[in-house]
Amino acid sequence: MSLDVALLGPMEVRLGPTPIRLTTGRLRTLLATLAVSAGDTVTFERLALALWGERLPANARRSVQTYVARLRRVVGRAAIRTMPDGYRLQADPERVDVLRFRRLLDDAARSRGTAAEPALVEEANRLWRGPPFEGIDSDWLCASLTPYLQELYLSAAERRIDLRLAGGRHGELVAELLDLASRHPLRESLWERLLVVLDRCGRQAEALAQYERLRLRLAEELGTDPGAELRRIHARLLRDDPPGPTRGPRALGVFAGRTTTLDRTGRLVEDEDGQVAGVLVLSGADGGGRTFLALVWSPA
C-alpha cells in the first residue's frame, strides 16, 4: 500500500486512501526526516540530531530504534527498511511532496523557455500549502531545510508570475503580489514585480505609493536605498512612460538564454537615466529569435 507524506504546510500522512494520525511529536519528526530522504539511507546520527538536537539521550541509537519500532506499527513494517548504518523509508519519492516539488522545479529549469515550463512551474506551486514542517518540532529540520525550501518556493512563485505576466495576465497577479510582498517585505524582486504589475493595470499612483513604502522601510530597518532595478522602475513611473513589455531578465526573468545580449542592448541604446538615446539594428540568421528579443527588450 502506497505511503504519501506531505510536508509543505501542515504534515499530512496517508497509507493508501486512509489518513494516518501520528500522535507524538517525535514520531512526526522521525517520519519527516526519513521522508525527505525517501529511497536513501538516513544515518542513526542524523535521525538522533533531528529528534533531540544537541540534547541526546544516553543511548541515542537505542532510542532511535525504539521510535522506529513505534512508527512501523503505524505505517507498516515494510515501509521502513533497516540498513547497516541507519534506516531507509521505502516510499516513492513522487509521493513525498518535498521531493516532488524539487523534481518539478528541476524539470522546469531544464525546460526553461519551452512550452512545457509553465505547467511544471504551476504544478510545483500547487504543492505549497504553507511553511514547511508545520507542526513538527525539530530544530534540525527547520534550520537545515526550511530556508532552502522557502527560497525554492519564492523563486518558483516569481517565475510563475513572470510567465503569467508575459502572457498578459497581469490583472490576476495584484492580490498575490501584495500578499507576497507583505510577507517578505525585504525581498526586492517581489516589489519589482508588484510595481510592474500595478503599472500594467493602470495603477501608477498605487505603484508609486508602494515604492515609497518600501523605500522608507529599507531606510529605517537597513539604512539603505532600494536597489538599482527598483529605482529604474520608479524613474519610469515618474516619467509616466507607457508600460509596454518589460525589458531584461532582471526585471521579470521571462526570457531565457539571452542575458548577455539583453544587457549589451541596454547599454548600447540607453543613457544613465534609462532614456532611449539611439537606434539599434538587430541582425542575424532567420529563426535566431531577433523578433522576440526586440519585443522583450522594447521599453514601450
Image: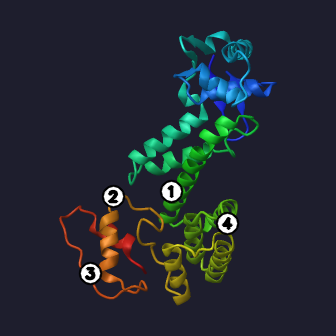
Q: Secondary structure at mark 4?
A: helix
* First of labels 2, 1 by sequence position: 1
Task: Answer whether labels 4 and 1 touch (C-beta < 8 Å).
Answer: no
Q: Nearer the viewer, residue 64 or 150?
A: 64
Q: Which residue is mark 1?
A: 159
Q: Earlier in the sequence, mark 2 or mark 3?
A: 2
> Which is more N-terminal, label 1 or label 4?
1
Distance between the alpha carbons at the discs numbered 4 and 3: 37 Å
* Image quadrant in which the N terminus is located: top right
Between 251 and 57, which is closer to the camera in this rendering? 57
Q: Amino acid at mark 3?
A: Leu
Residue 151 sits above or below residue 15 on the image: below
* Dot 2: element: loop
Q: Residue at position x 62%, y 20% from top?
A: 2
Identity, as a three-letter code, of the amino acid under mark 4: Leu
Q: Is residue 273 above or below residue 57?
A: below
Label 4 – label 2 distance at C-alpha: 29 Å
Residue positioned most to the front: 58
Residue bearing the label numbered 2:
257
Residue 70, quarter of picture: top right
Vertical position of residue 105 compared to residue 252: above or below:
above
Q: CA distance from mark 1 to mark 3?
A: 29 Å
Q: Mark 2 Cα within 10 Å, few/some/many (few <14, many 20+)?
A: few
Q: Quadrant of residue 123?
A: top right
Residue holding disc 3: 280
The location of residue 259, given as percent across then percent down, is: 35, 63
- Helix, strand or loop for disc 1: helix
